[in-house]
Image (cartoon, rainbow, N blue to C red):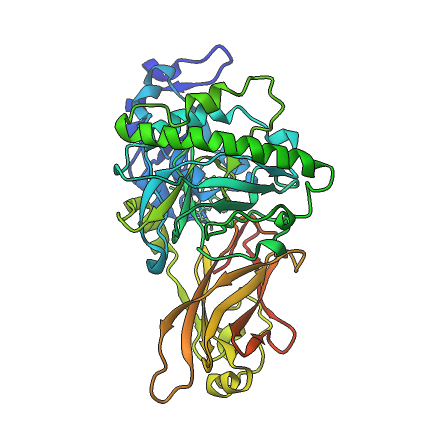
Amino acid sequence: MGETSEKSPSGVKYFRLSEIEEQKSIKSTWIIINYKVYDVTKFLEEHPGGEEVLREHAGGDATESFEDVGHSTDAREMAGSLLMGELHPDDRHKIEKPQETWVTPVADEYRRSFEMSFLRVNQVSSATDAIVDQTRDQTRDQTRDQTSGPDQDVEAPAHLSQLHLDNEHFTTISVLTITHHENVDAAVLLSRRGHAVVTPWFRSTAARRGPMSRSLLQFHAGGESPSPGQTAENGRGENEEADEEEDLDDEADASQLERFMRDRRRARSLPAYPAALLDGVPESDSRKRVKFADSMGLDLASVKHFSALEEPQIPSKVLSRHRSFPPQELFTDLCHSFTSSLDRLVSCFPEPLDTERRVQLLRVCLEKITITHFEVRGQIRVLCGRRVKEVGVRYTFNDWLSHVDAQALHVAAEESGTVGERFGFTVYTPPFMDPSSAVHFAVYLKSDEGEFWDNNEGRNYTLRYRCMGGTSAAFT
Ligand code: HEM
């Protein structure tokens, strides 16, 4: 078998890339993940993600796709049983791709062009030492690659003003707050692997923020930094003074940052972080360095935010992934058919009352919900009456230990024969939910006449997460 029999000093069998590439037939399917070679031929039919995705990568490198899915520990252990050996070290460079920057698709209403921006951490609450990392160097390299975006005026780069990290899953960001001067419609967090998470754009109520128990990315828009009193419960008290001191530091840094952004427009090959900012912080500096991670647990290197100038690029692989999980209409009138049509989801919706009556009764009511693999989209019917201030959904992933308000956008005016106007919202479901966990939510209307709620007659609406086939679980 010639080269195939070559082994590492530790006895690992090495395969040349050419040999692996030959294994993409009906009879045999090999893939490479993190330079390890797997024979997935017998696993094709069993693969919970489908045969097709494995075949697509037959004979080649599937690392990125494998990691993007956020495979579980079970999946990784399972892969061990399919392991054949490793890609020969001399061939590894052949499968290395240039870093690419891509974003996951966002809802149409959020789809905007983006410009490069970057963040600094100036306040970290409830962070554990375990997350302290050497991320700056990585970030610098990655961001340099990404700064070749459109040459736009970036007078006011976004900066990270608060970051609350989940102690339990310290690789995930629980609540991330960005303050910035312009209004933006969506934000994308990029990982070192190029993976991205798009958050729904909404104005959160800063005062209500608290540490979430699951991965959740949350952005605060609107130009004003939240006041210190608005930070989450953790990290206050004795840290308060230190935080304030750090705020002062940050003001000083801000001018350097602005200078850097100006320079960047002149010379794009500059490092993405101002040297003064990087070098000014000695290695022994006691400030925390934070390793960012997206909701898949992948490292984050930079933050992009959208302005109204350019369409984001959506790679075909992302679109195809989304096509594999088409949205399912769950109910059009109120969720009578919800439990019966989707036995994988358990819900606590009320007996169906027609939307017309409910909206007249409550002024606001949940009309429809659509669930995909990644998100829950809902439609709210609102009796507008006096001036509407805000329509939205309040939801929780942790049984109301904390919650988030997401604003709904106006989608349709009153139609003849129906009462009220329609608003739409999107809630992105975190991938690391326990099989027993649920999303609880209620919808609200804030108007000049007061606050009105449809909370399912006090019980709230609930979508339960159910395990399928032992290892996989989904919100579909
Ligand atoms: C040795 C290779 C692989 C093994 C053992 C494996 C195993 C699994 C398992 C056990 C699941 C269920 C969810 C979980 O436990 O994470 C899963 C889901 C999935 N896998 Fe893989 N997988 C492999 C490779 C791949 C590759 C290369 C791709 C993409 C190109 C892929 C795409 C998916 C998708 C899309 C899902 C569904 C995700 C979901 O339902 O959340 N898998 N895989």
Q: Residue at x 32, y 27 (%)?
A: 263
Whole-percent x, y for residue 46 in the image: 45, 47
Say if 180 sits above or below 273 in the image.
Answer: below
Whole-percent x, y for residue 178 in the image: 49, 45
Say if 240 sits above or below 458 in the image.
Answer: above
Report the label total. 0
The residue positioned farthest toward the right in the image shown: 238
Write down the quadrant of residue 173 in the picture. Answer: top right
Judge whether residue 133 can be spotted in this image: yes
Frontmost residue, 233 versus 49: 233
Say if 68 sits above or below 308 in the image.
Answer: above
- Looking at the rendered image, the quarter that the N terminus falls into is top left
Q: State left or right for residue 229 relative to residue 452.
A: right
Whole-percent x, y for residue 376 in the image: 47, 62
Q: Residue at x 73, y 41 (%)?
A: 237
Q: State left or right for residue 132 relative to residue 102.
A: right
Q: Residue at x 32, y 45 (%)?
A: 114
Indicate which quadrant contains ligand 1: top left
Frontmost residue, 433 versus 400: 400
Write down the quadrant of residue 55 in the picture. Answer: top left
Whole-percent x, y for residue 436 in the image: 63, 57
Write down the quadrant of residue 234 in the picture. Answer: top right
Say if 418 sits above or below 441 in the image.
Answer: below
The residue positioned farthest toward the top in the image shown: 9
Judge whether residue 42 can be spotted in this image: no
Frontmost residue, 11 versus 123: 123
